Image (cartoon, rainbow, N blue to C red):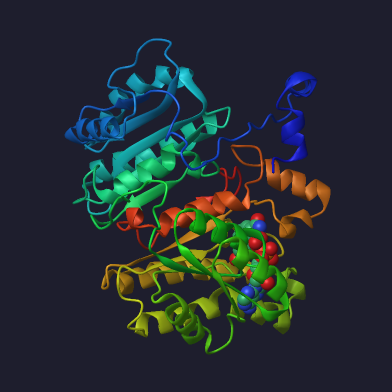
Amino acid sequence: MTDTYTRLVSKGLGRDVAKKLGLPQPAVLRRYEPGQPLISGPVLVEGSSPGADALAAQLLEWDLDVRRHAVPKERLGAIVLVLDDLESPADLEQPVLTAAPSLRDLAPNGRVVTVSRASDGATPAAAAVRQGVDGLLRSLAKELRAGATGNGIVLAEDVSATSPAALGALSFFLSGRSAFVDGQFVRIGSTAGRLPADADKPLAGKVAVVTGAARGIGAAIARTLHRDGATVVVVDIPTAGDHLADVANEVRGTALQLDVSRDDAGQRIIDHAVGRHGHLDIVVHNAGITRDKLLVNMDHGRWSSVIGVNIAAQLRINEELLASEHFRSAPRIVSVASTSGIAGNRGQTNYAASKGGVIGMVRATAPLLAERGGSINAVAPGFIETEMTARIPFATREVARRLNSLQQGGRPEDVAEAIAFLASDAAGGISGEVLRVCGQNLVGA
Ligand code: NAD
């Protein structure tokens, strides 16, 4: 659902008035639907490295209309800026300023994707230019208009631009699946991963568990994983049982009534998934609660319940998963964090501690999953239109909703798309990462 204000200012008199008054004019975002082309319009691949040539060849294989040089005034669906061979800050000017005029020709909902190298282990000059790409892309994303986004792929030293997860990330960033992801980087740490045989069913054959799935973001995750081909087990507390059953029916999966903070939650999840569906491949830790209070007024109940559900439960369940013989074949875990856990949020010290905790947990667990060919990542949503955010007082809500590059709140589906991507084998080379789905918050970290 598009918010009322966005609908009002997207056409006719509303658009003219908003323009005259200098009010925000959020674009209606192009979101993914099965069968939709990856991108509408030609893709300009800028850069002269072997990586740029290989990527251009790959995009041709995906049946995209690829340009290696800009055609004046041609409307572009996307610009892929390949910067994987830069050694010092002076190297940045030529490719960037060559691509710059083409930004004028980027179509509404167009995409800019940079492909660059990680700075760890590089010489000081190479590290400077590689980190420079970070600042460049984040600034450029703030300059784009009309629903266009800019995101970056960062390759570890021994990973090529056409490794499976780099291509998986490129496909995600180009497509409508990443509509509310803006100004973000994803690091490809290894050559692990595999592109799906059927791009519309990347999770075919997988069994996925989603916690907190009776409503909101969790229900959207269940629907998206089901759409992508997974068999889904939905988990929520017993008092949400009716809604949970509805979601389970809708996704033709099964329901498990369970408080994730119970000591035996991990074992019950494994027993249910394996007992009913034969195996367990994906676990999405989405269940989460808020108990907001300024720290000066914080009490034990608010603090311990938030830490208990949002992070302690995930740690305990992961321990059970890692110890289980049923979670060994390229298993994937995706946890829901929050931008509050990165930038902080007034009244949310307990929540931000728990969500910062999710990010730390994901980083430290990545090597443990790598041992079994698996991965673990976090998605950090910003302002998402749910029952939780609908309860925020109007003025505060309007500010929170507009203060990002896309000038609107995201939808539960936007978070679900990022989770579905990270849960897929196409993202196998990505682990220990945090992907923000926030439309590029303009304030905070
Ligand atoms: P929501 O309150 O609408 O849904 C959360 C679900 O989790 C509910 O169905 C609830 O019953 C379930 N749950 C709570 N405690 C549980 C427990 N102990 N065991 C099992 N299930 C439990 O919230 P939402 O907005 O859909 O948020 C989902 C996740 O996204 C949460 O982790 C939240 O912190 C995170 N998040 C949301 C936003 C946002 O803007 N809505 C932003 C950042 C992060």
Ligand 1, what quadrant? bottom right
- Counting from the top left corner in percent of width and height, residue 427 is at 35, 55
Instruction: Decide if residue 101 is on the left or right side of residue 285.
Output: left
Q: Residue at 38% of width from left, 28% of height from top?
A: 79
Instruction: Decide if residue 286 is on the left or right side of residue 72.
Output: right
Determine whether 136 is above or below 255 in the image.
above
On the question of residue 182 being in view, the answer is: no
Question: To which quarter of the image does residue 441 belong?
Answer: top right
Residue sitting farthest toward the top: 72
- Counting from the top left corner in percent of width and height, residue 293 is at 75, 69
Instruction: Decide if residue 319 is on the left or right side of residue 14.
Output: left
On the question of residue 282 being in view, the answer is: yes
Determine whether 250 is above or below 74 in the image.
below
Comparing 41 with 286, the one in front is 41
Q: Residue at 39% of width from left, 77% of height from top?
A: 278
Determine whether 218 is above or below 237 in the image.
above
